Image: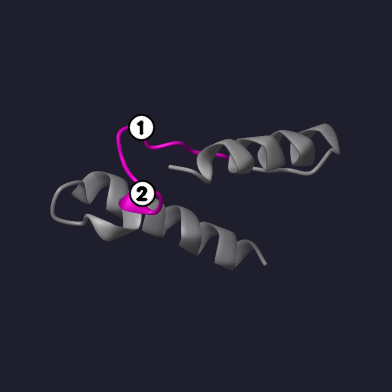
């Protein structure tokens, strides 16, 4: 995933700035693979939806 490293750097900067942040890496997949491959990774897909909903509910 070409965006993984940039995302991790951004996450670390947020944490260093005192921002509450959450990061999750799904190894062995492409960018957004956790959203694209429901049939192959249903547990990962559901966890992603749960996390997105949790974020939206926190706004």
How many marks on residues?
A: 2
Left or right: 7 in relation to 26: right
Q: For the residues marked 1 and 2, what is the alpha-carbon distance in whole angstroms? A: 15 Å
Residue 53 left/right relative to 47: right
Compared to residue 17, the image places residue 42 above or below, namely: below
Give the x, y percent position of residue 57.
57, 66
Q: Does residue 16 show up magenta in the picture?
A: no
In terms of sequence position, does the residue under pointer 1 or pointer 2 come before the other?
Answer: 1
Q: Residue furthest left?
A: 39
Q: Quadrant of residue 22?
A: top right
* Residue 33 % position (x, y): 32, 51
Is 30 covered by the magenta stretch?
Answer: yes
The answer to whether the residue labelled 1 contacts the one labelled 2, judged by CB atoms less than 8 Å apart, is no
Callout 2 secondary element: helix
Q: Residue at x 36, y 32 (%)?
A: 27
Find disc 1 in the rendering and name its residue.
Answer: 27
Categorize mark 2 by other alpha carbons within 10 Å: few (<14), some (14-19), many (20+): few
Task: Give the answer, above or below, for where 52 lies relative to 10.
Answer: below
Main secondary structure found in the magenta portion: loop
Q: Is residue 44 above or below residue 50?
A: above
Q: Is residue 22 visible?
A: no
What residue is rendered at 67% in x and 67% in y?
59
Q: How far across and down, in percent of the image, does residue 52 sit?
A: 48, 60
Residue 36 is at least partly visible in this image? yes
Q: Which element type, helix, strand or loop, lies under badge 1?
A: loop
Q: Which quadrant of the figure contains the N terminus?
A: top left
On the image, numbered disc 2 is attached to which residue? Answer: 47
User: Which residues lie in the magenta part?
Assistant: 22-33
Looking at the rendered image, the disc whose residue lies closer to the viewer, 1 or 2, is: 1
Residue 54 point in image, percent of width and height: 52, 58
Neighbourhood count class around disc 1 (C-alpha, 10 Å): few under 14, some 14–19, many 20 upward: few
């Amino acid at each position: 995933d070409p965006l993984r490293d940039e995302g991790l750097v951004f996450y670390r900067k947020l944490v260093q700035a005192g921002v509450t942040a959450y990061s999750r890496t799904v190894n062995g997949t492409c960018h957004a693979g956790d959203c694209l491959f429901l049939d192959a990774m249903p547990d990962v897909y559901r966890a992603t939806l749960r996390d997105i909903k949790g974020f939206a509910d926190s706004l």
